[in-house]
Image (cartoon, rainbow, N blue to C red):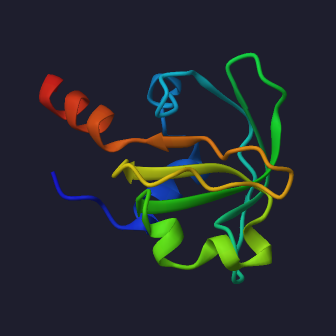
């Protein structure tokens, strides 16, 4: 299955269409969405004002960035852009093994890949 456009994944996130079971980090830890954030229509991360929690860790507040592949974060140069220093979640279709982005506070950004989960659901239907 080819990756959908980023705009489709952004829309799913915004509408809350992603089922909680899909939200598992690349390490297999559950991700709780406390606040989805609001769509950013300007330059910078896709959603602002989000809050997520990985397992029992302290919740991360910040932005959500959406890409087709995990490596797109670096391909787009976000690691050098100050607007991305407080990303709380990197939501991708495909985890191609790129290192997780780093926040300004030194914490790694959780990466959640949706592609395989969606493909399994399609096959079930």
Q: Left or right: 82 with respect to 28?
A: right
Question: Which quarter of the image is occupied by the C terminus?
Answer: top left
x, y percentage for residue 67? 46, 62
Q: Left or right: 16 with respect to 72?
A: right
x, y percentage for residue 123? 13, 29
Farthest-out residue, top: 56
Residue nearer the viewer, 120 or 113: 113
| Residue at 51%, 58% in the rendered image | 11
Asked if residue 26 is positioned above or below residue 103 in the image, the reply reads: above
Q: Left or right: 75 with respect to 121?
A: right
Res 69 quadrant in image: bottom left
| Residue at 78%, 23% in the rendered image | 57
x, y percentage for residue 44? 70, 76
| Residue at 83%, 58% in the rendered image | 104
Q: How many marks are shown on the rendered structure?
A: 0
Farthest-out residue, bottom: 43
Q: Left or right: 20 with respect to 3?
A: right
Asked if residue 66 is positioned above or below residue 61 in the image, the reply reads: below
| Residue at 44%, 52% in the rendered image | 92
Asked if residue 75 is positioned above or below residue 17 in the image, the reply reads: below
x, y percentage for residue 100? 56, 50
């Amino acid at each position: 299955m080819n990756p959908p456009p980023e705009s489709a994944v952004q829309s799913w996130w915004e509408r809350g269409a992603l089922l909680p079971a899909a939200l598992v980090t690349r390490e297999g830890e559950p991700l709780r969405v406390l606040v989805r954030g609001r769509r950013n229509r300007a330059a910078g991360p896709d959603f602002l004002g989000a809050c997520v929690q990985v397992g029992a860790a302290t919740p991360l507040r910040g932005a959500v960035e959406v890409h087709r592949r995990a490596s797109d974060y670096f391909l787009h140069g976000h690691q050098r852009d100050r607007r991305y220093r407080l990303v709380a979640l990197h939501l991708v279709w495909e985890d191609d093994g790129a290192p997780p982005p780093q926040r300004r506070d030194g914490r790694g950004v959780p990466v959640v890949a949706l592609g395989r989960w969606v493909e399994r659901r399609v096959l079930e239907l």
